[in-house]
Image (cartoon, rainbow, N blue to C red):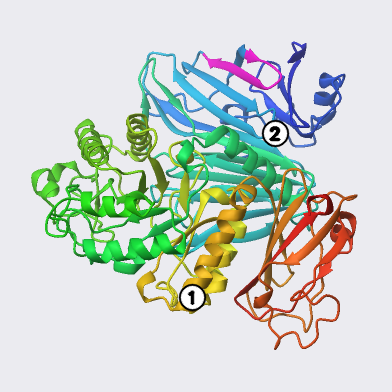
Amino acid sequence: METGEAGARCWRLDGAGQTMVFAAYEDRVPALIYMGEALPLYENLEALAASLRPPVGQVMLDEPLDLTLTPEAGRATPGHPGIRGDSHQGQNWHTQFRLTSVLTSTSQAVEFELSDSTVGLTLNIHVTLDPETGVAAFRQKLTNSGGRPYAVDWLNAACVPVPQHLVQHLSFEGRWCNEFREQRADWQKGIYARECRLGRTSHEHFPGFVALSANANDLEGQALAFHLGWSGNYRMVAQELPDGRRSVQYGALLEMGEVMLSSGESYETPVLYVAQSSQGLSGIRQRFHAFLRSQILQVPEWYKSRPVHYNCWEAVYFDHSVEKLSALAEKAADAGAELFVLDDGWFGKRDDDTSSLGDWFVDENKYPQGLTPLINHVKSRGLRFGIWFEPEMINEDSELYRAHPDWILHAEGRDRMLGRNQLVLDLTRSEVQEYLFERIHEILSNNAIDYIKWDMNRSIVLPADQFGRPASNAYVQALYSLLGRLRKAHPNVVIESCSSGGGRIDYEILKYTQRVWLSDSNDARERWRMQAAASLFLPPEVIGSHVGPDECHTSGRRLSMNYRGAVAASCHMGYEADLTVLGEKDLSELKGWSAFYKKHRKFMHEAHIYVHTTSTQDVIAMQMVSRDRDQFLLFVGQQSVPASSSTSALRLAGLAEEQTYTVSALNAEGISATANRVLAGVDWREHSLTLSGASLMRAGVALPIQFPETMLVFEGRAERDR
């Protein structure tokens, strides 16, 4: 909706109790001047715009420097520009866009069209506000409307202002098998930047960022969260200007000369998703989860139950035989699995990780009758069948490389950089796309396959195409094209985004896939921390979590089956261990957690999620509350030796204050008699507790003392449901 006069034109978007207000001063690039809880419909937007425009001080330019959606060097922005490029050997590097048209203006969407006739550019800025979840989406498109080529060095999806009361920020770093580590800091003058140059979202630089009020936590405080839906290189710039104003920009990171627009050509940014909350991080979590479930994910009907997985990787690695795999399928079915995934090693001459990537033909030595006997056996036990691919990679020791050494993504004359003995295929070449589609299509068409684990086990560096031009942006677009084509040809086949674990996780890849492999670490202790952090952006049904071997293969840590089972059951459960060597006790406990997951998965995968942590992070608890607030589950994970000699009351969240809940321990056998010499209040091994929602949220409940690396699970049910 547009209001205003020529000096200050204003627009507002409304939805899910949120309002966004944009103002264009003197028909320049619009600025987002307000994003927060709903304003009255009668609000005078021009007065609001005037009230928020800063004054001009001494030794400054004579007009306000507006913090627009695309800050321009040509408008003397004192901060990081939102657009950077040039035409004709450095000329026209500075833009001064004018608002020429508003192509869309509704209560949930606005599209501004701006032009700079001197440079010969048209800029379209598109913003939507989802009416059900309140998540905003920003993207921009730059078109060369002139006669000279224009080189795009940078274009942000948006520059979003950050209110000054949000004095802290939260970002995420990590490494392989140790993803989603939280970094919290105070804003300071200058730039805090994150750049990913690894060709995928990466383990190190998850593209998420949150601005927070002082001491905001999961339940209290203000938060403004950002996520870039993009599976390649990106740049994030969080800046505090000398005048105190703060902003966040996101966009794809482009190499020099990577995007060269000829007359009439366009470049479009990835989508930046933004959500705000006045209920701490839990408000962000609820908005993003609902948005992902309703607007991003496309899940075949058979997979909506999120079946229990069995993946054979950590049981057999490359040592395949139909007999051994059939025995594993028997054990998996007995334990409660519903999907069997054949991992790496079934194709070419793949006996280790040095050969055969690219040769997507069934290994006749391991499978003399093809995959059919194994698939038939798996299906006879009531399991669906999945298979592993790593389509983007190639080994030098492969038939494909020997036939097409020119198909790799590589800068001619530069040293090749191997990663896990792999080179990267140039997906931007049509013949490579066609080959990969045909090979995968043939395997899927000739075998009863329901699921693909799509892996990608190295970074992409020096991404040059066959002409030597940088191609990181084009590579990601080609990947989306290939995935889209396969999804169209096989709409009932589910695809998991696995990139040596958490290397490719974002909302754009989730438009083509239905599950992510959060980390290659099956260490339940590390997983519990990662799952809690990742839950800010990802609902539990999207996060694959498996029960690994007794001794974790990536950390060497030994953990109990009850702990491993509980951690896996809290997300999308699976197993990834040699089940044929499990003792009866472990197998019985695994069956128990499988049954628990199946009983509760529909509830858990629709629930509102809350995360509770102690100040020392020795306890991380995850609470799942049903939409009608009649039921909750509480997973309480003890990460390390308790910091205190006893426990404080844990305050719950999201319950109905007037409702009465009966709370029970679902795995009371896990309560240690050694750690708890006396359970003074409630002996959870024999009794339950009945309290109001108000009491559980305001006073809380003292829970048993736990030893490190253990998990207790509690259930609360409204009295009328019992």
Quadrant of the drawing holding the N terminus:
top right
Q: Residue at x 15, y 42 (%)?
A: 406
Residue 197 location, x and y as percent?
A: 41, 49
The residue at 23%/64% (across/down) is 323
Q: Which residue carries the number 2 mark?
A: 134
Q: Is residue 557 above or below residue 602?
A: below
Q: Which amino acid lies under the numbered mark 1 shown in the image of this protein?
A: Asp
Q: How many numbered callouts?
A: 2
With respect to residue 16, does 105 lie above or below? Answer: above
Rendered position, 161 above or below 574: above
The local crowd at label 2, few if under 14, some if 14 to 19, many if 20 or more residues have their Cα within 10 Å, is many
Q: Read off the magenta span.
A: 104-116
Residue 87 x, y percent position in the rendering? 40, 24
- Judged left or right of residue 486, residue 111 is right
Between residue 712 and residue 317, name the one nearer to us. Answer: 712
Viewer can see residue 187: no
Helix, strand or loop at disc 2? Answer: loop
- The residue located at (81%, 32%) in the rendering is 55
What's the residue at 53%, 71% (across, down)? 589
Cβ atoms at labels 1 and 2 below 8 Å apart:
no
Query: In the visual, does 73 lie left or right of 287?
Result: left
Q: Earlier in the sequence, mark 1 or mark 2?
A: 2
Magenta highlight on residue 109: yes
Three-letter amino acid code of the residue under disc 2 = Gly
Q: Which residue is mark 1?
A: 586
Tell me the element at label 1: helix
Is residue 668 visible to us here?
Answer: yes
Q: Is residue 190 magenta?
A: no
Marks 1/2: CA–CA distance: 45 Å
